[in-house]
């Protein structure tokens, strides 16, 4: 895959530029929406949930923001990736290029937005007097896992979307369920230990929890936590790669 990206470097670069700029085409504020949109979403969620779930929680805004940040990156990346093949059918049906380049370009676009919002999270953390420690470097781990996980899920969704256009509606239902199961605006301490373990079956919650452990608790998760995070990412990537290899030639007949 890396060799193919090098070979088609110019095409890949142009796709990333196109996907990132197309998102803000004909908007007045342009790329400023990358920062403004999560800020407005955070403000709304804070106003709605602070009186119901915060319970005077220390650094609740950061708690909420870190959860919303990770989940927004996941949904943005997968939603864009789902349409990667169908929206670029006019290109790969005429020119023989690796089809995953279109999906990867969408993921890079989402990653840029995520990076801009991450800077905003650090700014809010400084304002809220969250202690910055050397352990923040470990945030690279869940970010890498998220990137790999999103690419894998994107490959699965984009392949299914070629054959079943209902997938966009089904995925909307799934992401809504995941949002409520990711403890974005509430804590799980009130649940029993067994229920708390069930939450870890949700990869998005696990990555959110990793962020909160580093930023709010100043602690590094256990080895088992790291292994589980990597397992989710690698399984998603393996399944996505399998689906792409199996149906690679059939995409041309359904787009």
Image: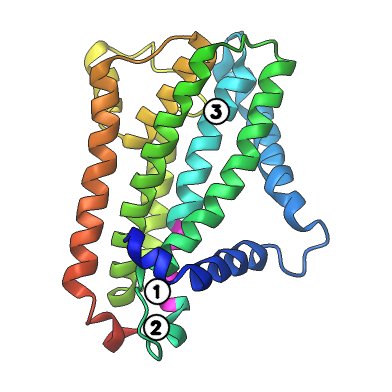
Q: Is residue 37 magenta?
A: no
Q: In the rendered view, would you say 97 is above or below 217?
A: below
The tag on residue 85 is 1
The tag on residue 92 is 2
Q: Dividing the picture into quarters, in which one does residue 56 lie?
A: top right
Percent position of residue 138, x then y: 44, 22
CA–CA distance between discs 3 and 1?
31 Å
Q: Is residue 85 magenta?
A: yes
Helix, strand or loop at disc 1? Answer: helix
Q: Dividing the picture into quarters, in which one does residue 45 lie?
A: top right
Categorize mark 2 by other alpha carbons within 10 Å: few (<14), some (14-19), many (20+): some
Left or right of 46 in this view: 174:
left
The tag on residue 240 is none
What span is in magenta?
79-86
Percent position of residue 72, x then y: 53, 43
Helix, strand or loop at disc 2? Answer: helix
Categorize mark 1 by other alpha carbons within 10 Å: few (<14), some (14-19), many (20+): many
Q: Residue at x 49, y 9 (%)?
A: 218
Whether pointer 2 and pointer 1 mark residues with C-beta atoms closer than 8 Å, the reply is yes
Q: In the rendered view, would you say 226 is above or below 33?
A: above
**First in sequence: mark 2 vs mark 1:** 1
CA–CA distance between discs 2 and 3?
38 Å
Q: Residue at x 38, y 49 (%)?
A: 150
Task: Name the outermost residue toward the right.
Answer: 28
Residue identifier under label 3: 66
Q: Residue at x 73, y 51 (%)?
A: 33
Q: Tell me, what colour scheme is on the image?
A: rainbow
Give 81 or 180, whichever is nearer the viewer: 81
Q: In the rendered view, would you say 132 is above or below 110?
A: above
């Amino acid at each position: 895959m890396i060799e193919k990206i090098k070979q088609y470097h110019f095409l890949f670069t142009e796709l990333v530029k196109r996907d990132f700029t197309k998102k803000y085409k004909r908007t007045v504020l342009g790329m400023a929406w990358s920062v403004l949109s999560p800020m407005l979403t955070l403000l709304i969620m804070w106003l709605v949930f602070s009186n119901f779930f915060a319970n005077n929680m220390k650094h609740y805004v950061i708690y909420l923001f870190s959860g919303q940040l990770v989940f927004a990156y996941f949904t943005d990346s997968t939603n864009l990736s789902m349409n990667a093949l169908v929206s670029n059918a006019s290109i790969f049906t005429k020119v023989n290029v690796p089809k995953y380049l279109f999906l990867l370009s969408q993921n890079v676009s989402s990653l840029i937005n995520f990076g801009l919002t991450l800077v905003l999270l650090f700014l809010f953390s400084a304002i809220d007097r969250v202690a910055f420690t050397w352990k923040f470097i470990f945030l690279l781990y869940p970010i890498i896992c998220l990137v790999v996980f999103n690419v894998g899920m994107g490959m699965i969704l984009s392949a299914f979307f070629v054959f079943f256009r209902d997938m966009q509606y089904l995925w909307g239902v799934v992401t809504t369920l995941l949002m409520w199961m990711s403890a974005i605006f509430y804590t799980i301490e009130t649940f029993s230990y067994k229920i708390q373990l069930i939450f870890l079956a949700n990869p998005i919650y696990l990555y959110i929890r990793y962020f909160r452990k580093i930023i709010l608790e100043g602690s590094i998760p256990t080895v088992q936590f790291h292994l589980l995070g990597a397992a989710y990412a690698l399984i998603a990537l393996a399944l996505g790669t399998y689906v792409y290899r199996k149906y690679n030639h059939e995409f041309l007949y359904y787009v």
